[in-house]
Image (tube, grey):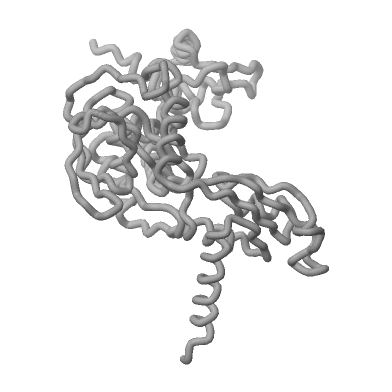
Amino acid sequence: MTDTTPARLLKLLSLLQTPREWPGGELAERLDVTPRTIRRDIDRLRELGYPVEASRGSAGGYRLVAGAALPPLVLDDEEAVAIAVGLRAGAGHAIEGVDEASVRALAKLEQVLPARLRHRVSSLQNATVPLARGDGSTIDPRTLTTLASAATGQERLRFAYRSREGTETRRQVEPYRLVSTGRRWYLVAYDLLREDWRTFRVDRVSEPFATGARFTPRPLPGESGGADGGGAEDAARYFARSMAGRQPELRLDVWFAAPTEFVVARLPPTLGVPEPVPGPDGENPGGEDSGNGCRLRSSCTDSLEWVALRLALVDCEFTVQGPPELVEHLERLGARLTRAAGAPR
């Protein structure tokens, strides 16, 4: 006779992961076994590391509680589809806080999804029109999961890449880590054809293909650890150094006529955190009724255009003390917007 215990345990675990207390008799009825069998199965789950709590009495029962470690989850079809769609939506737009760990989770989930569920996830994704944030790049989540899986599995990748100038090239790389800046994803990898390390903007990657060829991770320049030693932190430091060499640094000095909490909630953390201070030279550029202000003094390597846009989106009066090139860009932008508002209709 076929042993049905593993299948029964999975079904029992699925029921217990519903946030409620299950009477033993109801569990026995649902699984078509005796209460004694339920007690034995509960003991087996506990031996496997699932913290199942039992309460005594006529109203007693079983429920799964939080433990010291996360045991494997059992998801039904609807739950699996919902999680995959949510992770895809977040990862595809590089939402701040949805970092490499989220992409790895998505890669693991999609790897084990049955074909029928993968089709449902893709159908839902294709039928959904996202609200663009205007300061990031839309990425096909399948590209992210392919890159993440290859980096985790230490598997060489091939893909097409479009440079800033629009030049198309084919690359073969050893992927190291994905890095999220909050509005864009980047891949840190060793380029086999150029025999050097490179960072690739993921929104410019297309047709990624894992070759199946394994590799031993190389240490990043200036880092002693490989994939087993501080890999994510090493990649973040290398990426920061790489970006600093490409884009001139902007030393921001901006005063906002709004409380610090208001500005922090609307300003990307990558631009820094303002501190509460009075206006420049003790004045209040926002006027007497503007309330307390705050001042942002930080450095970044973002473009003038993006920084100007993000400052304007804070939606309060502000004064830029520096750098001079940002002041000049805002003057040109302001004149252009003024002309646009006064154009004949």
Is any part of residue 12 visible from this angle?
Answer: no
Give left or right: position of 329 versus 104.
right
Q: Is residue 210 above or below residue 257?
A: above
Camera-nearest residue between 241 and 273:
241
Q: Would you identify the image quadrant in which residue 174 lies? A: top left
Give left or right: position of 274 versus 248.
right
Q: Would you identify the image quadrant in which residue 54 lies? A: top right
* Residue located 59% across and 17% down the image: 53
Q: Is residue 124 above or below residue 325?
A: above
Where residue 141 sits: x, y (%)? Answer: 33, 44
Residue placed farthest to the bottom in the image?
344
Give left or right: position of 56 versus 4.
right
Q: Is residue 330 above or below residue 250?
A: below
Camera-nearest residue between 143 and 315:
315
* Residue located 30% across and 54% down the image: 126
Camera-nearest residue between 233 and 60:
233
* Quadrant showing the N terminus: top left
Where residue 197 sits: x, y (%)? Answer: 30, 31
Camera-nearest residue between 98 and 296:
296
> Total marks drawn?
0
Where residue 277 sits: x, y (%)? Answer: 78, 52
Where residue 190 sits: x, y (%)? Answer: 28, 29
* Residue located 46% across and 13% down the image: 45
* Residue located 67% across and 63% down the image: 318
Residue placed farthest to the front in the image?
324
Give left or right: position of 258 versus 47.
right
Is any part of residue 197 visible from this angle?
Answer: yes
